[in-house]
Image (cartoon, rainbow, N blue to C red):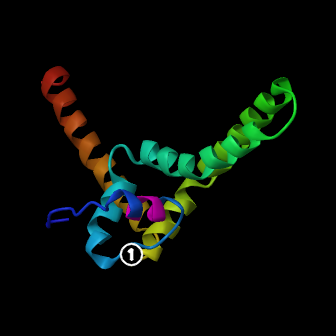
Amino acid sequence: MGSELVRPDPFRWLWYAVGGRLPGRYRDWVLHDTTTRTWIWRHAARSSVLLVPLCSVWLLLPGPLGLRLPLVLLAALVGYFYSFAYIEESIEHRLAKNGYPRGTGKRVRAEAKAELEKDVLQRYVARYRQ
């Protein structure tokens, strides 16, 4: 990712969050979004874009609040459960939609983790194994 990242505007980000493909100039940003250190939190934010409106509608349904609140809580829990159960597949699909080969996200995150662990190991050896 040698070039400067071009972030999408809020409307394009919403489109991206609901599963839309972004124009090519955002390609590097999509890779960054799905592989950066905070990729899981970013996935949670994108999942929330889909779940919050749905849960809000259920909260506004007629009926006792004591019934609507558990319904909304259960819907949110199930939604987030499935969102995170298939997080790797979702990320790879999102990257493929934006022009990356399958497996790119997992590979880039693994490389970053290996680099981080290499630095940690070097500090450990320097400190405790001299």
Q: Is residue 39 above or below residue 108?
A: above
- The spot of residue 125 in percent (x, y) is 18, 29
Q: Is residue 93 above or below residue 66?
A: below
Residue at disc 1, secondary structure: loop
Res. 71 image quadrant: top right
Q: Residue at x 56, y 53 (%)?
A: 87
Q: Quadrant of the C terminus?
A: top left
For the residue pair 53 and 20, the one nearer the viewer reads as 53
What's drawn in magenta, residue-wise?
A: 12-16
Most foreground residue, 67 or 110: 67
Q: Which residue is mark 1?
A: 100
Q: Is 46 situated left or right of 23 in this image?
A: right
Q: Position of residue 84 (x, y in %)?
A: 60, 47
State the predominant SS element of the stretch in magenta.
helix
Furthest residue to the top? 128
Q: Amino acid at mark 1?
A: Tyr
Residue name at image x 44 percent, y 42 percent: 41
Q: Is residue 33 left or right of residue 64?
A: left
Whether residue 107 appears in this view of the structure is: yes
Query: x, y (%) of residue 15?
Result: 47, 65
